[in-house]
Image (tube, rainbow, N blue to C red):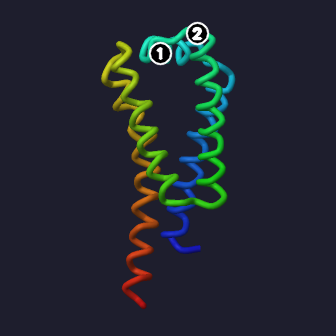
Amino acid sequence: MSNDKKAEWLLRIGVAGEFVGHGLLAIGGKTDWVGWISQMINVSAPTATTLLFLIGILDVVVALVVLLRPMKPVLLWAAFWGFWTALVRPLVGQSVLDFVERSANWAAPLALYYLYRTRSKKANEAR
């Protein structure tokens, strides 16, 4: 297996692991996250719990897509969502370091996106 393919699989596994982990925590109704949703969009705890459950399902779906059949639009969504969820930490009063600590949450899917984009360009140039 080439180094390029190994790097691809490491990124796929990393992104999938992050999204399945966060997704399962969301499905389980992680208390802090329910509070953050309530705080950010001014909804009741039951509504925030329902939204978090739906977000968790979407995160698990993203993880499965990235692992089984990565698609560039899904990777861009994962990068956006990873950036946003990292940014939420300082927005709800946590340290900016909580954002910095989560850089891989958006950088890994973005790196995988650019890896596929570069491959597509090279394939098109070869034609």
Q: In the rendered structure, which amino acid carries the disc numbered 2? A: Ala
Q: Position of residue 36 (x, y in %)?
A: 47, 15
Q: Which tag, 2 or 1, sits closer to the chain's start? A: 1
Alpha carbons under labels 2 and 1: distance apart = 10 Å
- Towards the viewer: 24 or 45: 45
Q: In the rendered structure, which amino acid carries the disc numbered 1? A: Trp
Q: Looking at the figure, which quarter contains the C terminus?
A: bottom left
- The residue under the point 59% across, 32% down is 55
Q: Which mark is residue 45?
A: 2
Q: Is residue 115 left or right of residue 56?
A: left
Residue 101 drawn above or below residue 35:
below
Q: Looking at the figure, which quarter contains the N terminus?
A: bottom right
Q: Position of residue 40 (x, y in %)?
A: 42, 16
- The residue under the point 35% across, 13% down is 93
Q: Is residue 45 left or right of residue 87?
A: right
Residue 100 drawn above or below residue 13:
above
Residue 73 drawn above or below residue 43:
below
